[in-house]
Structures are given as structure tokens and as C-alpha cells.
Amino acid sequence: MKNGLLVTALLATSALAQAATIAVPAGADLQAAIHSARSGDVLEIAAGTYRGNFRIDKPLTLRGLGRPVLDGGLQGDTVRVIATDVTLEGLQVRNSGADLNAQNAGVYIQPGADRATVRDCALSYNLFGLWIEKAKDVRVERNNITGMRDLNSSQRGNGIQLYNTTGARIIGNTIGFVRDALYVDVSHHAEFRGNKLHHSRYGTHYMNSYYNLWEDNDSYYNRGGLALMEVKNQTVRNNRTWGNSDHGIMLRTMQDSVVEGNVIAGNNRGFFIYDVEYVKVLNNLVVDNRVGVHLSAGSTRNVVEGNDFVSNREQVRYVGAKDEVWGKERGNFWSNYLGWDRDADGVGDVRYEANDMVDRLTWRYPHIKLLLASPAVQALRLVAQQFPVLRVPSVVDPKPHMEPTHTNWSIWRDKHYPGQ
């Protein structure tokens, strides 16, 4: 066994010794240089424009010097990676084809092309920026990705498409003007950290994926910031999702996850929570949304603690058959709480109830809002409070905080989608 390990180590050392750094001058045939290179070689590509649809069929590094352009001529994939251990860095990759059925991409990482790395590149005017399928341990780092901005959203591809992958690391990218900035399906044990996702349908469209980390990302000026659907075992931590025209964070059919420390500001709906169970929603700032939380479809048995709900036009929109209790252990802050704190312990003496009969009526009959200041509507609200028989089920917090935890909440006001 020891002899076998020694032989393997010697072979690896020999392969590294044979690897070379090859200069590719401006105007050279890049595909020919790829073809003639040996596994492990580094191609240093001089500044210039290289036209073609490039195939990388062996472990190579393509390193740009002075930001060379790889131009696909609006046909097919600009670069297709079919080997393991390929690295692309410092390149401008542009002008793929526009065939959605063929999934044309700036960089297409096909099944089995494990451990591919794309870093410090600019991918522009491609249908899909990167298409990554059935590949393990892919790294996509510090790239700037924009799509075919002149096409309608439905005709564009996604910035980064992950399908049936394991161990991906998507870190520090800026992605915009695509259909969905990140589209993630059946992809597990991945990390998404430090990305900026903007001006797309969804910042992230995320389905059927488990054991993933979503941390320190910004999603803004999209239709939806972060959509997590049909997922479990997620950690969604310290992200900022603001100014999206629909929702900030959508949790749909989700279990066994943690959503903590996020800022959700200036969206039409801050959280949209649908069919969610056994999820911890902790220490988030939900501020200046039209609806702070839209809660429905049996979302129960969750832990909702330590959150600040500040200056949302409606704190919670909840329709259910029974009360949903949040803040059982340490409570949340609600900026529209009207109770008192006689013992000065920082917790209100009267529980908070998010909705009443008048709220229900305004959801069903929006024109009633014109009468909200009328004595009749105010009397109805008072009667509903005094006579439990008229009470409707609500989100209830037995330990409402008197002060928010996020003392800097005001910096997140007025972050709405342009024109709203």
C-alpha cells in the first residue's frame, strides 16, 4: 500500500514538473494553443480579441494579461469546459448565441467537469453567463456578469445556472440585467457569499437544494430578492435584500433551516412565508416594507424571536384558523405596539396582536381604506377588541420589546424600488 502511494505521488510530481507556462500573443489562434498545450499548462493570453467557440478538453489554466476578449460571435457557447481542473481568470467572455433550447452560455461547464474555477472575469452579452451542470466543487469568484440587456426578461438566460451540482462556491460576484441572477436547482453543500444581485427577475431563484449557506449577499432592484422554494437545511445569514418590487425574502415549502441577522427593507413584501415549518427566524430587521410579513398556508411550528419590525405599512398580513404565537421566549419589537411597560423591564405588559377584524376587511375590500379614519371604522375596531366573539386569529407576541435591537434601523428607510 505504501509503495502504491509513493508511485501516485511520484506521478503527480512528474506531471507538475512537465507543466509549462505558455505565452499566447495577440492575434494567435487560441484554440490551436489550447489543442497543443499539455495537461496542467498555463496559457497566458495577451490583450486582444480572440474570436471563436473555444473548447477546453484537458486540465488547463487560461490566464488573461490585460483583459483579453474571448468573443463567441453570437453563436453557441463562447467557452465550453469539458475537462476537470480547468481555471479561467482575468478574461472578458462575451457574445454567446441566444438559443434558449441549446442553453448557450459565455462559459458552459458540462457534466463531469469537476473543480472548474472562473475568477476575476467579465462575462457580458451572453445568454447564460455560466451554465454549470453535474459538476462538483466548482468555484465562481469575483466575476462581473451582465446579460443580453436588449432582450425581454423572459428571453434572457440566467447569470449563473447551477443544476445537480455539489460543493459549489459562488463568492463575490456582481450579477445584473439577466433573467435570474442566480438560478439554483438540485444543488447541495454549496456556499453563496458576498454576491451583489440586481436588476433581474429574481436575485436568486433557488429550488430543491439542501445543506447550503447563503451569507452576506445584497439583492436589490429585482422583482424578488431571494426565493427559497422546496428546500431544507438552509442557513440564510446576514444578507441585505432591499428595494425589490415584490418580496425581499420568499420562504416557500421550507423546513429545518435558520434565517437570521438579515436586513429586509423597502420591498413590497418583506418576508413572504408560505408552507414553512421548523424554521428559526431570528434577529432580522424588517423595515419600511409595504407588508412586513405575508404569512399563509399553514406556516407553523417556527421559532420567531428577536426580530425588529419597524415602520412597515402593515406589519403582518396573516390569514389562518388560529393564532400564531411568535416570540414565546424573548419576543420581537413592533413599532406600532401601543402597550406599556410598568415594571421598566423592556418588555410590554400587554401582548401584541398583529391583525384585527378591520385588517381582514381591508384585505378583502381594499376600498375600505378610504374610511379608515372614520368614526364607524374606529368604533368597529374598538368593539372587536372589547368583545372576543368578534376577534379574528392573528400573529400574537406575548413579550413585545419596547425598543428595537437594531438601533441604526433608520438608515434603511426609503430604499424602495425606483418609481414606487
Image: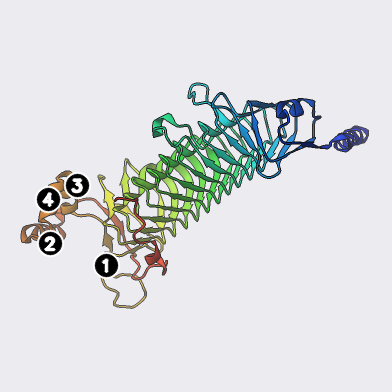
Q: Position of residue 299 (x, y in %)?
A: 35, 44
Amino acid carrying label 2: it is: Leu
Q: Secondary structure at mark 4?
A: helix
The residue that mark 2 highlights is 382
Q: Is residue 307 left or right of residue 360?
A: right
Which numbered dot is residue 363?
3
Q: Is residue 211 left or right of residue 153?
A: right
Work out how far the residue at label 1 is from the one at label 3, CA to CA, in angstroms: 26 Å
Residue at 47%, 58% (x, y): give it.
Answer: 261
Give whichever of discs 3 and 2 has the lower sequence position.
Answer: 3
Amino acid carrying label 1: it is: Val
The residue that mark 1 highlights is 350
Seen as rendered, the residue at the extreme right is: 3
Work out how far the residue at label 4 is from the one at label 1, CA to CA, in angstroms: 28 Å
In the rendered picture of this protein, how many numbered marks are placed on residues?
Answer: 4
Q: Quadrant of residue 341?
A: bottom left
The residue that mark 4 highlights is 368
Q: Nearer the viewer, residue 300 or 14?
A: 14
Work out how far the residue at label 1 is from the one at label 2, CA to CA, in angstroms: 16 Å
Q: Is residue 109 left or right of residue 253?
A: right
Work out how far the residue at label 3 is from the one at label 2, CA to CA, in angstroms: 19 Å
Above or below 32: residue 170: below
Q: Is residue 164 visible?
A: no
Amino acid carrying label 4: it is: Ile
- Quadrant for the N terminus, please: top right
Q: Nearer the viewer, mark 4 or mark 1?
A: 4
Residue at 48%, 53% (x, y): give it.
Answer: 239
